Image: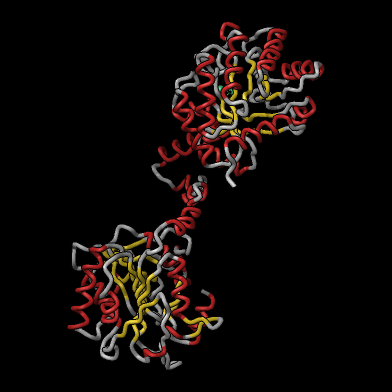
């Protein structure tokens, strides 16, 4: 369940006030937020340094609050953990500070951290002096204005005293002023190599019985064991810039290598795959969810089942493959999972064997014995004037992935399924195109490769065998296909489907493409052995 902004603010508050030490990971984009959450972080730090760096800007209030909010919104949209935003100084004055709370709340942030420096600030790791510090009461005014604007929104007050070399008493006094102004936590910043400033602060803070939680950023005193922070009673540790620094190094390395080598080979195995990007973007979720929301009519499948099996003497589509289910049942299920809701079944021999089903139009090809699938396909398409349309042989079993691959080729009017492993006796409908693809590199998961088909039939140009599934993507494709089917079935009644493809290939106005599917993704049922293979599929 996606948490609301309010729930995230409450969770952050709980985290700050718990006895356990919590951790926040820096992020600077929607993607880095997703990565940090996936790694297990229960809180995210929207770092001002990193968000600026991501845009190429300096950490000096060069980005305005709306630009920061946009990035926070992407982070919040794609994660479900609280985000503490680096609000720099909280803006130029108390009014800007409350506007900031309002905007960050709308962006989905759980809280903000504001530092007691003058606007415009610069990063704490650059040169800083006492002159950079804000009047503590002006800062406290910003905190009060922020808490009044939205009491649930977490406000962390950050002390820059140690950074600016102010003395301890002044820094500590500021913490008390911010606490009294209503800050939900105090962030004590330090940039020396050990934790002595933090130790000093924490010892005093706890001995004074302060209950306001303390947050730290151990970027410079990173060698201090984390358990030491636990012992001190720190509430939240922010790992403030580590995703940004890791990505800079990785990007520099890959750019240098590709530039120098003029090749991708040296880097390919060292970088994330494109499918990893899709996974992080949760592309699968989209594919699944869109089935719910797209209109239920998503196309038609025309299933050609005019002849009987030589083994059973029954229409091939009625061969039982598993658990009493027929080839036809399996095809209907596969199409349904792909969103197809309308079916046309072409019958011929023993046509009465088919019982009517509510969502299947039964159409008879009376000339089934003198014709082939070309004429059946033409009859099947007669009443159809919208796309997509699949046409498939009725003796096929194929996986969902076949339809997925075919539907992913959107730059063709008509797409046909091809098996590249065609040099066996199982296949006879050779298709010609370029290039021939190596069957070894084809898997169910890969993005399908597609080939433009050519009308030239030369032995060595064959690029695969037609598996018996066609997808018509466009109205143009449908309008081109129908007359070709009609003409071929009239002039050459025994011609096979390849003749249709050959004809379409020679028409430059229609784009016909083949898409490769693996032999393990489909089977046509001719023998008992095929039924066994179908069970595996
Ligand atoms: C940030 O991450 O932007 C911070 C922490 O403010 S620091 O860079 O340490 O100042
Ligand atoms: Mg910052």
Q: Is residue 427 left or right of residue 189?
A: left
Q: Is residue 505 visible?
A: no
The front one of 155 and 304 is 155
Q: Is residue 361 left or right of residue 195?
A: left
What residue lies at 46% left-to-right and 49% top-to-bottom?
274
- What is the total number of numbered labels drawn onto the structure image? 0
Q: Give residue 258's position: percent from left, percent from top.
A: 42, 40
- For ligand 1, the image quadrant comes to top right
Q: Give residue 490's position: percent from left, percent from top.
A: 19, 83
The front one of 135 and 44 is 135
Residue 515's place in the image compared with 377, above or below, is above
What residue lies at 70% left-to-right and 27% top-to-bottom?
223
What residue lies at 62% left-to-right and 29% top-to-bottom?
152
Q: Is residue 279 left or right of residue 17?
A: left
The quarter of the displayed image where residue 440 is located: bottom left
Q: Give residue 199's position: percent from left, percent from top.
A: 76, 19
Farthest right residue in view: 207
Residue 17's place in the image compared with 502, above or below, is above
What residue lies at 45% left-to-right and 20% top-to-bottom?
62
Q: Is residue 447 left or right of residue 456?
A: right
Q: Give residue 91's position: percent from left, percent from top.
A: 51, 17
């Amino acid at each position: 369940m996606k948490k609301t902004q309010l729930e995230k603010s409450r969770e952050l508050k709980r985290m700050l006030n718990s006895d356990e030490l919590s951790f926040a990971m820096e992020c600077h984009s929607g993607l880095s937020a997703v990565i940090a959450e996936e790694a297990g972080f229960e809180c995210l730090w929207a770092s001002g340094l990193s968000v600026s760096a991501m845009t190429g800007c300096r950490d000096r209030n060069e980005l305005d609050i709306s630009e920061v909010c946009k990035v926070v919104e992407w982070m919040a949209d794609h994660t479900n953990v609280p985000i503490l935003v680096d609000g720099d100084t909280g803006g130029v004055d108390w009014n800007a500070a409350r506007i900031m709370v309002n905007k960050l709340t709308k962006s989905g942030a759980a809280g903000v951290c504001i530092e007691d420096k003058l606007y415009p600030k610069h990063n704490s790791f650059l040169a800083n002096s006492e002159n950079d510090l804000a009047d503590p009461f002006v800062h406290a005014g910003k905190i009060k204005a922020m808490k009044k604007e939205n009491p649930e929104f977490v406000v962390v007050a950050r002390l820059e005293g140690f950074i600016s070399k102010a003395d301890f008493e002044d820094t500590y006094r500021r913490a008390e002023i911010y606490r009294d102004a209503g800050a939900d936590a105090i962030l004590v910043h330090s940039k020396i190599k050990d934790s002595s400033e933090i130790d000093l602060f924490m010892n005093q803070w706890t001995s004074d019985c302060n209950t306001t939680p303390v947050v730290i950023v151990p970027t410079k005193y990173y060698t201090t064991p984390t358990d030491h922070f636990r012992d001190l009673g720190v509430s939240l540790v922010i790992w403030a810039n580590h995703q940004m620094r890791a990505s800079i190094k990785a990007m520099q390395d890959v750019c240098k290598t590709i530039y120098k080598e003029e090749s991708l080979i040296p880097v390919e195995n060292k970088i994330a795959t494109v499918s990893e990007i899709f996974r992080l973007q949760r592309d699968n979720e989209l594919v699944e969810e869109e089935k719910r929301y797209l209109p239920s009519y998503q196309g038609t499948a025309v299933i050609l089942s005019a002849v009987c099996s030589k083994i059973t003497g029954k229409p091939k589509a009625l061969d039982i493959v598993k658990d009493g289910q027929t080839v036809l049942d399996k095809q209907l299920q596969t199409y349904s999972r792909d969103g197809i809701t309308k079916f046309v079944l072409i019958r011929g021999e023993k046509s009465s064997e088919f019982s009517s089903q509510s969502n299947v139009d039964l159409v008879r090809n009376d000339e089934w014995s003198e014709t082939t699938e070309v004429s059946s396909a033409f009859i099947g398409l007669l009443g159809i004037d919208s796309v997509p349309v699949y046409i498939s042989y009725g003796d096929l079993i194929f996986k969902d992935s076949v339809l997925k691959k075919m539907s992913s080729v959107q730059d063709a009017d008509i797409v046909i399924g091809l098996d590249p492993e065609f040099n066996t006796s199982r296949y006879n409908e050779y298709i010609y195109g370029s290039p021939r693809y190596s069957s070894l590199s084809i898997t169910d998961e890969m993005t399908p490769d597609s080939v433009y088909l050519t009308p030239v039939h030369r032995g060595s140009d064959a690029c695969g065998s037609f598996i018996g599934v066609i997808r018509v993507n466009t109205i143009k494709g449908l309008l081109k296909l129908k007359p070709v089917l009609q003409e071929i079935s009239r002039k050459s009644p025994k011609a096979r489907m390849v003749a249709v493809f050959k004809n379409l290939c020679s028409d430059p106005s229609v784009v016909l493409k083949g898409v490769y599917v693996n032999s393990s993704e489909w089977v046509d049922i001719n023998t008992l052995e095929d039924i066994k293979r179908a069970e595996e599929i």
